[in-house]
Amino acid sequence: MYEIVEDEYNQFLQDIEDGSMIFGRYIDESEYEDEYSHNDIDEAQDKFIEKVREYLHENYPGKYIVSGSWCVFVMTPDRAREGHISERTIELFTVK
C-alpha cells in the first residue's frame, strides 16, 4: 500500500515540475479496489494528502487546493471556481 503512496506522490511531483499543474487526480479508488480494501485505500489517500499538503505548504502556499473523496484532487483555486466549487470550500481546502 505504501508503494501506491510513493508512486502517486512521484507522479504528483512530476506534474508540478512540468509547470502545467492545474488539475490532478491521484489514488483513484477504482484503480486499486481490486487489489486493496477500501480501508487500505483510504489510509493511502490520507498519507498521500499529508505528503502533498506538506510539500505545497513549503513550496507553493496559497496556490493549490487538496481534497479527498473517491480520489485525491489537487487543483488551482481558479480551476475549482470553473468547477463551481464554493469560495468557502476553496478557502477551507487551500494549502497555506
Image (tube, grey):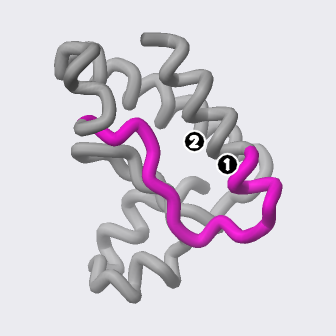
Residue 2: x, y in percent?
A: 50, 12
For the record, the magenta segment spans 14-29
Look at mark 1 in the image and give the residue it sits on.
56
Above or below: residue 85 compared with residue 50: below
- Looking at the image, how many numbered discs can be counted on the residues? 2
Q: Which numbered dot is residue 68? A: none
Using a 10 Å C-alpha cutoff, classify the residue at mark 1 as few (fewer than 14 neighbours), some (14 to 19) or many (20 or more): some
Name which residue type carries label 2. Answer: Arg
Q: Which numbered dot is residue 53? A: 2
Q: CA distance from mark 2 to mark 1?
A: 5 Å
Whether 40 is among the magenta residues is no
Above or below: residue 90 compared with residue 52: below
The quarter in which the C terminus is drawn is bottom right
Residue 35: x, y in percent?
A: 27, 15
Asked if labels 1 and 2 touch by Cβ distance under 8 angstroms, the answer is yes
Above or below: residue 82 compared with residue 71: below
**Closer to the camera in the image, 1 or 54:** 1
The residue located at (33%, 19%) in the rendering is 43
Whether 19 is among the magenta residues is yes
**Closer to the camera in the image, 4 or 95:** 4
